[in-house]
Image (cartoon, rainbow, N blue to C red):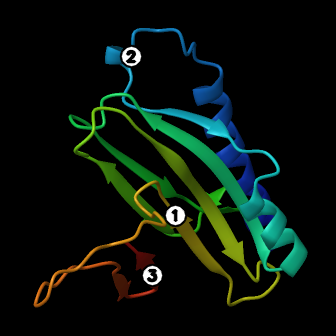
């Protein structure tokens, strides 16, 4: 069980290293996303204070958010072998109304020391905005979807 988390952490760290070592000053037309670690964020501190589990918090910038689509997923490994042939969890974002979009995304593991651990991703589309409604108007403000062996929030 512990090795699974070590390999998962290694995959995330390698991803961050590869993305983090690229030059940010390159032409933004050549890149669809810039990702950096958000060290000691309030999300991290909350997870630590409440002893909920593990969280990895990142900043993301989409320089061409109105023309691009980004897929982010988590793969799990145990003893060097992939746990599932499909992704443990995944999110997608892009095709925004604004040209440049910035926000946060991250990976969390609730109850990592148990067999009932829960993986989740959160992305830049999750906001604390006030939604105004007119009489008779309906708006979707959140979606919860559960499939076989997976839980996704959109």
Inter-mark Cα distance, 1 to 3: 15 Å
Query: Which residue ends up furthest to the front in the rendered image?
Result: 135
Query: SS of the residue at dot 2?
Result: helix
Near-viewer residue (20 or 62): 62
Which of the two discs, 1 and 3, labels the residue nearer the N terminus? 1
* Res 70 quadrant in image: top left
Dot 2 or dot 1, earlier in sequence? 2
Q: Quadrant of residue 86?
A: bottom left
- Please name the residue shown 39% across and 70% down the image: 130
Observer-side mark, 1 or 3, equals: 1
Quickly name the residue at label 1.
122
Measure the C-alpha gap from mark 2 to mark 1: 24 Å
132 lies left or right of 27: left
Q: Residue at x 62, y 61 (%)?
A: 107
* x and y percentages locating residue 108 in the rendered image: 66, 67
Q: Percent x, y for residue 14?
A: 67, 37
Disc 3: which residue: 150
Near mark 3 (Cα within 10 A), the count class, few <14, some 14-19 or many ≥20, is: some
In what element is the residue under mark 3?
strand
- Sequence-wise first label, 3 or 2: 2
Is the residue 66 above or below the residue 8 in the image?
A: above
Pick whichever, 4 or 136, lies toward us. 136
The reply to whether residue 31 is in sight is: yes
User: Is 93 situated left or right of 136 in this image?
Assistant: right
Quadrant hosting residue 112: bottom right
Quadrant location of the N terminus? Answer: bottom right
Q: Secondary structure at mark 1?
A: strand
Give the label on residue 28, or none: 2
Q: Position of residue 54 (x, y in %)?
A: 77, 67
Q: Position of residue 93 (x, y in %)?
A: 34, 52
Measured in 3D between alpha carbons, the distance from the residue under mark 3 to the one under mark 2, in whole angstroms, is: 35 Å
From the viewer's perspective, is 71 left or right of 122?
Answer: left
């Amino acid at each position: 069980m512990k090795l699974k988390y070590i390999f998962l952490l290694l995959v995330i760290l390698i991803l961050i290293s590869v993305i983090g070592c690229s030059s940010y000053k390159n032409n933004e037309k050549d890149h669809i996303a810039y990702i950096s670690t958000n060290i000691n964020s309030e999300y991290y501190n909350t997870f630590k204070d409440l002893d909920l589990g593990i969280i990895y918090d990142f900043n993301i910038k989409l320089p061409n958010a109105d023309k691009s689509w980004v897929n982010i997923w988590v793969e799990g490994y145990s003893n060097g072998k992939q746990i599932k042939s499909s992704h443990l969890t995944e999110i997608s974002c892009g095709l925004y109304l604004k040209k440049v979009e910035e926000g946060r995304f991250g990976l969390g593991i609730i109850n990592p020391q148990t067999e009932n651990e829960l993986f989740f991703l959160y992305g830049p589309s999750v906001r604390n905005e006030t939604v105004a409604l007119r009489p008779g108007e309906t708006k979707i403000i959140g979606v919860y979807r559960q499939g076989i062996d997976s839980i996704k929030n959109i």
